[in-house]
C-alpha cells in the first residue's frame, strides 16, 4: 500500500502526499493544526484525513489538550507500513540498522572492521543481516522502502561507488560499486552518501532540530566533516565535504598523506600523533596496519602513557581546534558536534579542542560545542531520513 501511494504521480493525489508528509513531520498532530499548515478548506482536509486513515497510512494516536470541549484527536503516520535499512561503513565499524518510518531503531548489528573485512565480506554479511531482519521482523521486499549507505569519501554518489578512501585494515576498498551490489539482492532504492554528512542530517532531524547551522566532525585516522547550513545539507558532488581535513594551515608545513604540505590532517590525525611520538614509541611487533585495526586499543595505550604522549596528543587537539574555528567562523555554525576515538577516549582531548576552538572564534561566541559518544547512530538516522525524503522527491540539494 505505501509503495503504491509513493509511486502514484497523478496530480489530483499530490495533495494526499502533502498532508501525509505534514503528519509525518509534525505528528502527532490535530486537524486544527493541519488546517493552519495547509490552508485547505476544512471539508477538503477532513476528507483527505478520512481517506488516509481508511487506507491505513495514518492512525489515531491519542488526544490533544482540550480547550473546554471534547479533546481533539491526534494523528500520526502508520510507522510500521514500511522499513528502511541504513548501512554505515567506516574504518573501525560497519553498522547495519533497521528503522521504521519514524526513523526509530528497531534492530541493528555492528561488525568490527579487521584485515579480513574486504568489501566482498562486508557486502555478503550485510545481505545476510538484512535477510535476518526480514525474517525476525516479518517483512518482505515489498515493505522495504530503501537502503541508505553512509561511507568514507571520496565517493561517486551518482554511480554509487566508494572511490579511494584512506586505508582500511582490509585490502580492496577502492572503486567499490556498493549500490550496484546491494541492488542485485534488494530491488529497492539504494543511495550512497558521505557518512559525516548523514551524521549532520541525523543531528538536524534529532536532538539539534532547533538549529539550522550544524557541523559534525569526526577525527581519527582522517577527519570527517558534515555540514548543515541554513537548514540545508552541504554536499560536494563527490561526497568530499570531509576533505576539510586537507585545508592548508601552513604552506611550508608537515607532509600530509595526500602528498601536499601543511594540511590540517597532517597535524591532527592519529598518523600525525604517531609520527610526532616517533618510532621508539611503536611496538616492534606491531606495524601501522595493526594500529589501524586496533584503534581503540591504541587510544587506550596513548591514554595510559600520558607522560610520554600528552604533548603530542594535545598538540593534535590544538590544531584541530584551530581548524574547527575556521569552519565555524566561515559558516556561522550554531552547534558543533565532535566525535571520534580521541574525543571519546583520551581524557582531556575534547576539553582542549573546545577551549582552542572558542578562543579562535571571531564573532560567533554563542556556538555550542558538544561531545557525542558516537555519530554512527546519527549517521544511521540520517541515512533513513535521506531515503524517506528522496522517495517523496524531497532530497536536499540534489
Image (cartoon, grey):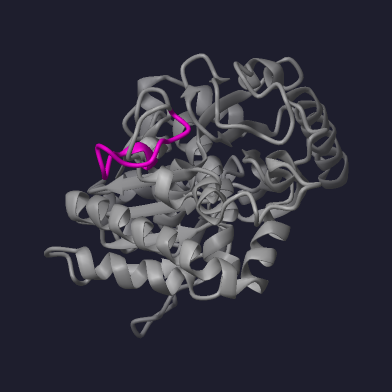
Q: Quadrant of the N terminus?
A: top right
Tell me if 317 is positioned left or right of 180 in this view: left
Q: Position of residue 106 (x, y in %)?
A: 71, 54
| Above/below status of 160 relative to 386 | above
Q: Which residues are magenta?
A: 245-258
| Above/below status of 129 relative to 378 | above
Q: Quadrant of the C terminus?
A: top left
Could you say which is closer to the camera, residue 73 or residue 165? Answer: 165
- Residue at the bottom extreme? 68
Q: Position of residue 240 (x, y in %)?
A: 40, 31
What's the residue at 56%, 32% (across, down)? Answer: 166
Total labels: the figure holds 0
Taking the image as drawn, is residue 23 in sight? no
- Residue at the front extreme? 280
Taking the image as drawn, is residue 104 in sight? yes
Instruction: Give the overall secondary structure of the magenta segment.
Output: loop
Q: Position of residue 190 (x, y in %)?
A: 59, 25
Query: Is residue 97 rendered magenta in the image?
Result: no
Amino acid at each position: 500500500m505505501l509503495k503504491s501511494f509513493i509511486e502514484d504521480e497523478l496530480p489530483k493525489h499530490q495533495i494526499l502526499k502533502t498532508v501525509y508528509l505534514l503528519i509525518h513531520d509534525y505528528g502527532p498532530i490535530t486537524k486544527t493544526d493541519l488546517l493552519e499548515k495547509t490552508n485547505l478548506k476544512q471539508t477538503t482536509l477532513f476528507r483527505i484525513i478520512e481517506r488516509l486513515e481508511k487506507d491505513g497510512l495514518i492512525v489515531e494516536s491519542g488526544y490533544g489538550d482540550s480547550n473546554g470541549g471534547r479533546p481533539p484527536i491526534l494523528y500520526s503516520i502508520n510507522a510500521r507500513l514500511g522499513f528502511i535499512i541504513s548501512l554505515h561503513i567506516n574504518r573501525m565499524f560497519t553498522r547495519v540498522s533497521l528503522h521504521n518510518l519514524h526513523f526509530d531503531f528497531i534492530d541493528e548489528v555492528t561488525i568490527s572492521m579487521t584485515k579480513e573485512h574486504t568489501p566482498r565480506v562486508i557486502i555478503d554479511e550485510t545481505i545476510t543481516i538484512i535477510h535476518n531482519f526480514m525474517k525476525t521482523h516479518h517483512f518482505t521486499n515489498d515493505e522495504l522502502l530503501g537502503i541508505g549507505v553512509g561511507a568514507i569519501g571520496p565517493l561517486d554518489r551518482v554511480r554509487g561507488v566508494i572511490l579511494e578512501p584512506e586505508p582500511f585494515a582490509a585490502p580492496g576498498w577502492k572503486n567499490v560499486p556498493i549500490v550496484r551490489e546491494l541492488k542485485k539482492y534488494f530491488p529497492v532504492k539504494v543511495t550512497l552518501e558521505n557518512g559525516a554528512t548523514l551524521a549532520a542530517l541525523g543531528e538536524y532531524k534529532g536532538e539539534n532540530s532547533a538549529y539550522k547551522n550544524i557541523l559534525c566532525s569526526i577525527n581519527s585516522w582522517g577527519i570527517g566533516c558534515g555540514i548543515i547550513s541554513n537548514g540545508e545539507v552541504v554536499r560536494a558532488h563527490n561526497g568530499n565535504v570531509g576533505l576539510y581535513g586537507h585545508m592548508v594551515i601552513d604552506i611550508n608545513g608537515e607532509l600530509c598523506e595526500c602528498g601536499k604540505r601543511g594540511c590540517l590532517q597532517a597535524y591532527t590525525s592519529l598518523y600525525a600523533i604517531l609520527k610526532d611520538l616517533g618510532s621508539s614509541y611503536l611496538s616492534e611487533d606491531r606495524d601501522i596496519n595493526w594500529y589501524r585495526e586496533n584503534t581503540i586499543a591504541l587510544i587506550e595505550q596513548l591514554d595510559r602513557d600520558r607522560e610520554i604522549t600528552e604533548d603530542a596528543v594535545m598538540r593534535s587537539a590544538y590544531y584541530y581546534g584551530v581548524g574547527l574555528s575556521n569552519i565555524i567562523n566561515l559558516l556561522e555554525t550554531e552547534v558543533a558536534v565532535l566525535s571520534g576515538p580521541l574525543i571519546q577516549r583520551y581524557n582531556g582531548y575534547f576539553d582542549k579542542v573546545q577551549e582552542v576552538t572558542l578562543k579562535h572564534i571571531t564573532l560567533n561566541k554563542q556556538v555550542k560545542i558538544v561531545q557525542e559518544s558516537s555519530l554512527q547512530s546519527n549517521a544511521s538516522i540520517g541515512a533513513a531520513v535521506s531515503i524517506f525524503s528522496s522517495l517523496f522527491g524531497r532530497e536536499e540539494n540534489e
